[in-house]
Amino acid sequence: MEVKEKARAKAEQYCAYQERSQQEVRDKLYGWGLHQQDVENVIADLIAAGFLNEERFALAYASGKFRIKGWGRHKIRQGLLQKSVSAPLIRTALASLDDDAYREKLYELLQAKARLEKEKHPYKRKNKLLRYALSKGYESELALELLSDNEL
């Protein structure tokens, strides 16, 4: 079996384990010592066989980072950009997040952080909670709205 065929088999296993972006697979193939033409041929084969789908990856990435890690849209967008996902697919993935669930997740995160926060001064406390929400990738307007509407 030639090198390209072995790489394709390994790449199929790599993609079957979890959704991958084209850039992740490309980097892995280069790491295995393949040349550019072989890498592009293997990627084309993986796409044709259904092992690699950039839209499916973007949706799974956005959903997983939101549900499991509690990331906001800004942080998810940055993660997808690092994975070299196209702008239209990033917009699609971010639009797939349910707005009500998004607000609820941020509220739960702020509540949990507020329980752990030792700061008693109301302005400093609110500022710390806002910075936490921003660090998780949430929009400042939404975080401020939740912090103003609720006593955390």
Image (tube, grey):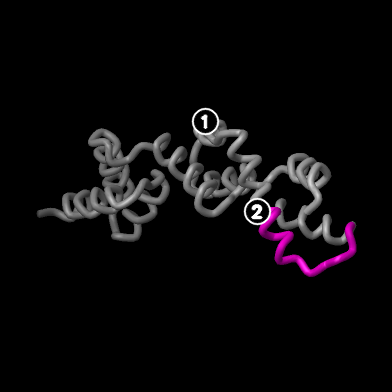
Tell me which numbered mark, 1 or 2, is placed earlier along the sequence.
1
Magenta residues span 110-122
Farthest-out residue, left: 1
Identified at 24% across, 38% down, the residue is 45
Q: Is residue 92 left or right of residue 10?
A: right
Per the image, the residue denoted by label 2 is 109
| 11 is higher (above) or lower (below) than 94 | below
Per the image, the residue denoted by label 1 is 92
Q: Is residue 34 left or right of residue 103?
A: left
**Where does the image place residue 46, in percent across and percent down from the top left?**
27, 40
Callout 2 secondary element = helix
Q: Is residue 26 magenta?
A: no
**Where does the image place residue 84, in percent across and percent down from the top left?**
49, 44
**Amino acid type of the residue tagged 2 in the rendering:** Leu
Identified at 16% across, 50% down, the residue is 5
**Amino acid type of the residue tagged 1 in the rendering:** Thr
Few, some or many C-alpha atoms within 10 Å of disc 1 (few <14, some 14-19, many ≥20)?
A: some
**Where does the image place residue 137, in percent across and percent down from the top left?**
66, 49
Front residue of 5/50: it is: 50
